[in-house]
Image: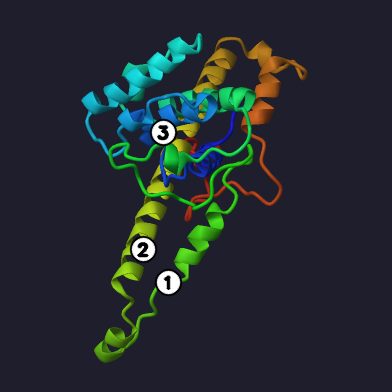
Amino acid sequence: MGESRQELLAWLNNLLQLNITKVEQCGTGAALCQIYDSIFQDLPMGRVKFSVNTEYAYLQNFKILQNAFTKHQIERSVPVESLIKCKMQDNLEFLQWSKRYWDQYYPGGEYDALARRKGAGGAPAAAAPTPVSSRTSGAGVGATSAARRGTTPTTSTTSAARGARQPTGGASAAVVVENTQLKQTVEGLERERDFYFSKLRDIELLLQQAVDQDPEIEKAEDGLVKHIQAILYSTEEGFEIPAEAEGGVVDDQETF
């Protein structure tokens, strides 16, 4: 099983000295280009555009990536039409594959991401000041966020006190950015949760249909149906399936 979305984002930001908050942002092609530049160090990063928001601009980045794939004889095709739509699942799958490829072929040593993309069309601000020197993923990112959280101002009961305690412009902007990133992270987690829940629900419905058609398949204690049901309905220690506030009946849509 590949890395989770959060693990991939931590690795990506640490490797490229970026501040990407959603896997969907890889749909611009810029970060993907630099992942492979960290391996081969011969992509024309000066032509890769980071601060773009049109599919036409994304296509220009993906042309650079496809040329790199051709040059280095990477047999996997790049699903450009899917990736530029900036959908989570398509970009997550390709990023997971890219991470596995990077694990196998990264030459080691330091990779100075900032220097490599210098002048690359307004690249985003770096997430950390030091270049990557190993394959470890994203250590220290959480510490940076925690440090920024410490700048949150305390609200006073009087307008005079509020004026005295008002943070500087830079600190206030940092709080706004932090809050925005946290909101985007929560939204991304909710979308990911709903996506996988819908998959589990589809499996449950298909299984129920199969049992309805042939009840005998559910009687085999060591059969496939029993094993699937055990996985679907298993819980972790300390977890309780929530009941309705009044009736105490669990909605059949909330099995998991």
Of labels 2 and 1, earlier in sequence is 1
Place of residue 190 in the rendered image (x, y in percent of width and height, measured from the top left): 43, 43
Provide the residue designation for mark 2. Answer: 174
Q: Earlier in the sequence, mark 2 or mark 3?
A: 3
Dot 2 crowding, Cα within 10 Å, few <14, some 14–19, many 20+ = some
Q: Amino acid at mark 3?
A: Ala
Q: Tag 2: residue type? A: Ala
Above or below, 21 against 225 in this view is below
| Screen quadrant of the N terminus | top right
Colour scheme of this structure image? rainbow
Find residue 151 and name its label. 1
Q: Nearer the viewer, residue 223 or 215?
A: 223
Q: Position of residue 14 (x, y in %)?
A: 53, 44
Instruction: Compare residues 246 and 8 and report the one nearer the observer.
Output: 8
**Going 72% across and 17% down the picture, which residue do you hit?**
219
Q: Dot 3: few (<14), some (14–19), or many (≥20) neighbours within 10 Å?
A: many
Q: Is residue 42 left or right of residue 136?
A: left
- Give me the residue at 50% from left, 36% from top: 252
Q: Seen in the image, is 106 located left or right of residue 30? A: right
Q: Amino acid at mark 1?
A: Thr
The Cα atoms of the two marked residues, 3 and 1, are separated by 30 Å
| Residue 234 position within the rendered picture, expressed as x and y whole percent measured from the top left | 67, 36
Position of the C terminus, as image quadrant, is: top right
Residue 53 appears left or right of 251: left
For the residue pair 80 and 126, the one nearer the viewer reads as 126
SS class, disc 2: helix
In this figure, which residue is indicated by the disc labeled 3?
A: 31
